[in-house]
Amino acid sequence: QIAARGVRGLNTSPHLPRPAHPTPASSAMSEVAGKVPGLKEQPTVVIKVGTSSLLRANAGTLHLSQICTLCETVSRLHARGIRVVLVSSGAVGAGMFRMGLTEKPKEVAKKQALAAVGQVHLMRYYEDIFNTLGVKCAQVLLTLENLSNRKQYVRARNTFTALFDMGVVPIVNENDTVAVEELRFGDNDTLSAQVAALVEAQWLFLLTDVDGLYTSNPNTDPDAVRIEVVENINELEVDVGGAGSSVGTGGMVTKLTAARIACAAGCKTI
């Protein structure tokens, strides 16, 4: 069932502090650290942040203020005893900026190479910012094959458990450099939902630069209407095709897919 606990705009949960006006991902990330009811002792929360929220596409740089806000939010949750997994996109986009590229290459090998360049760049900032906040973090790279193989699935779950026990925040991304097309998550929305199921998370937050779910793309359709609550995701009729940005791979359609996966595992999705 997807209602109050289901797919929502980032600022529409009745249990989270609500601003006077809709705000993009920066404010929504701060709200995640607000009061989240119904959580057991040492609850687990998965936060997924998209490429468009981490990069300034027009400037060709990382969006440092957004990244700092995100890390501060994770730090506040961590200080409250909440186990947090951060699923971070942006490796390919960051790699493009580092290499001075304005368009994403079509060749798989080049995209994988850019992911290798960008991933270390992103992790450098995550490590520095979290270290300043007194939080230890770890890099976890996964492929669909890892979670499709029972032995690898169990090992991955045990690794997350060990990291939680050590008070470390796992930062997850798809292992683009080795993933083949047939065994890819394809987008980090799906990856975040699979990780939420893996760690038995109670909440999955899909952060984006759009302030909610609309009937169509509000950037191109002036008649687009925001949908506050989805009562039945199977009856949802919206136009959500296409990637969210020129450097990203997701979009709203992948977030709805992620919501289906997470809710099937008993994880509330916002």
Image (cartoon, rainbow, N blue to C red):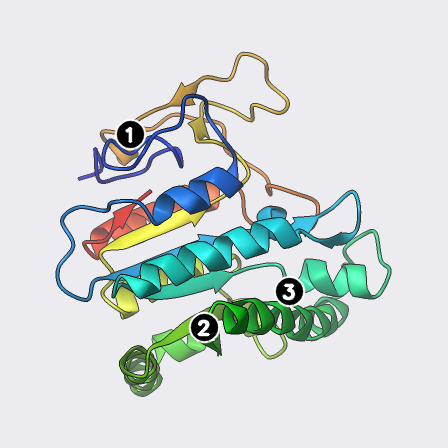
Place residue 44 in its image quadrant. bottom left
Q: Residue at x 52, y 57 (%)?
A: 187
The residue under label 1 is 230
Q: Position of residue 71 (x, y in %)?
A: 49, 59
Percent across and percent down for residue 229 are 29, 27
Q: Which quadrant does the C terminus fall into? A: top left
Question: Is residue 19 positioned above or below 221 on the image?
Answer: below
Report, in whole angstroms, how far the alpha carbon at label 2 lies from the one at label 1: 38 Å
Query: Does residue 184 appear left or right of residue 2 in this picture?
Result: right
Q: Position of residue 6 (x, y in %)?
A: 26, 39
Q: Which residue is mark 3?
A: 91
Pick the front one: 223 or 178: 223
Mark 1 residue element: loop
Which residue ends up furthest to the right in the rendered image? 100
Tell me which numbered mark, 2 or 3, is placed earlier along the sequence.
3
Residue 199 spot, x, y in % from top left: 27, 69
Residue 75: quadrant of the picture? bottom left
Is the residue marked by circle 1 packed among few (<14), some (14-19), or many (20+) residues within 10 Å? some
Q: Which residue is disc 2 drawn over?
A: 134
